[in-house]
Amino acid sequence: MACGRRFGKTLMGGVVCLATAVKGASVAWVVPTFKNARPIWRFVEQHAAGVASVNKSELIAKFPGGGWVGVYTGENDVALRGEAFDLVVVDEAAQIKPETYTDVIMPTLADRDGRALLISTPKGKNWFYQEYMRGMADGELYASFTAPSSANPSPQIKRAAQMARERMSERTYKQEWLAQFVDDGALFVNIDKLATLAPQPYQPGHTYSIGVDWARASGGDYTVFAVIDATTKEMVNMVRIQGWAFERQLDRLAGLWNEYGQPAIVAEYNSLGGPLVERLQAAGLPVTGFTTTAGTKHQIISGLELAFDQMELKLLNDHALMLELNAFEKKERAGLPSYSAPSGFHDDTVIALALAWHNVAAPSWLMLGDE
C-alpha cells in the first residue's frame, strides 16, 4: 500500500498487527532501522498493556491465546531468519533492501502460508514499486492500494498537505504527499502523458511499421505485434496473444499486415524467430529479421527511451503496455547495459514496440542485426 506522509500508515499497521496477534497468530512488524522501531514499540506497549505479556528486551508481546507480535528491523534481519509468521507487516517498505524482503521475509511466511502487508511512502520506482505493480496486475494473490495524505480525515493533516503543495517541488509533493511513484531514474519517462490513445484504423496515405516479439505456444510469455503510424508517430494497434500455435500466430500477423496497408515488419530473429521470419519472407511479406544481442538491444531500447523523453511517440492507453514499460529495467553488468523485465514480469510489449519504433526512426535496411 502506497501512502502519503501523515496518512496514518503506522497506526494502521499497528492495529492490523495487534488484531491479528490477539487471535492467536504469529506476527512480525518490520521497520527499516532501530530508530524507526522506537515509536512502533511504544505503540505495542501502550495498546497491549494489561492484555499481553511484554518483553522489552526482545520487543515481543505475547497474548493469552498463544499469539504474539514482535518488532524487527531490516538492518538486523538475522533475527528474522528461522522464524515462521502468519503475518508480516513491513513499515516504510521502500526503505528496506530488496533482498531483505525476498531472501529473509518471504521464507518466513512459507510454513504457515502467511501474508505480507507492505506499507510505505514511495521512494522512486524501486522494488516496492514492482510489488505494487504486481498487485495492480494480479488481482488474485496480490492487491495494491494508494492513500494520499489528504485521505487522512484530520483537518490538520489536510491543511499540512495543502501547505506542502505550496512549498515544495512538484516531484517531491507527488511522491511524499500524493503517494505517487515518480520516475526518479526510471528508464522510460512521460508514460502517463503519452499513453492516451485508443486503437485507430488504417488511414490511406499513411506509412506504418509493425514490430514483432515471438513467444512459444507452451510458454508463459506473449507474442506481441505492435503497430505504429510513422506518419503521425502514434501507436495505433497492438495484438497480444498467448498460447497460440505458430500457424495461428503467422495468420494473425498476415491479417494485421493487410489491415494496415502491407507495411514493413521488423521481427525478432533469435531462436524460434528465425524459421518464422523465413516463412513470412517466403510468403512475400516484407519482413526484416532482428537478431537481438546486448548491442542491438541497447540500440532499440535507447531509441525508444529517447522518444519518450522527447515525447515524440504517442502510445495506446493499454494496461499491459503501461505495466511493462513502467517495470522495465536497465542494469549495468561488467560495464555494459542490460535490459529486462523484473522477475515475474513480461517485456514482450516493450520489445515489439521498440522494434516498430526503430524501424520508424531508422529504416530496416539500416538496422543492426538484421538477417
Image (cartoon, rainbow, N blue to C red):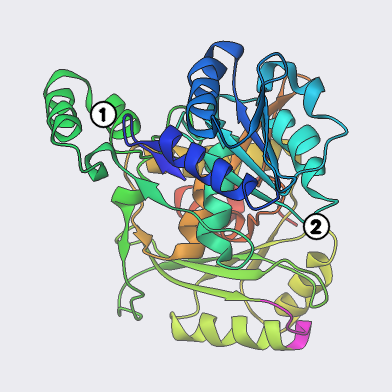
- Residue 288 drawn at (x, y percent): 66, 62
Write the start and end of the magenta stretch as one range: 242-247
**What residue is at 63 percent from the left and 54 percent from the top?**
347
Residue type at mark 1?
Tyr
| Residue 243 falls inside the magenta stretch | yes
CA gap between label 2 and label 1 equals 45 Å
- Can the viewer see residue 363? no
**What residue is at 43 percent from the left and 28 percent from the top?**
184
Q: Nearer the viewer, mark 2 or mark 1?
A: 1
Residue type at mark 2?
Asn
* Quarter in which the C terminus is drawn: bottom right
**What residue is at 53 percent from the left and 80 percent from the top?**
257
Q: Disc 1 designates what residue?
A: 173
* Residue 12 as seen in the image, left or right of residue 66: left
* Residue 82 as seen in the image, left or right of residue 1: right
- Residue 251 drawn at (x, y percent): 66, 88
- Residue 101 drawn at (x, y percent): 70, 35
Q: Which mark is residue 270?
A: 2
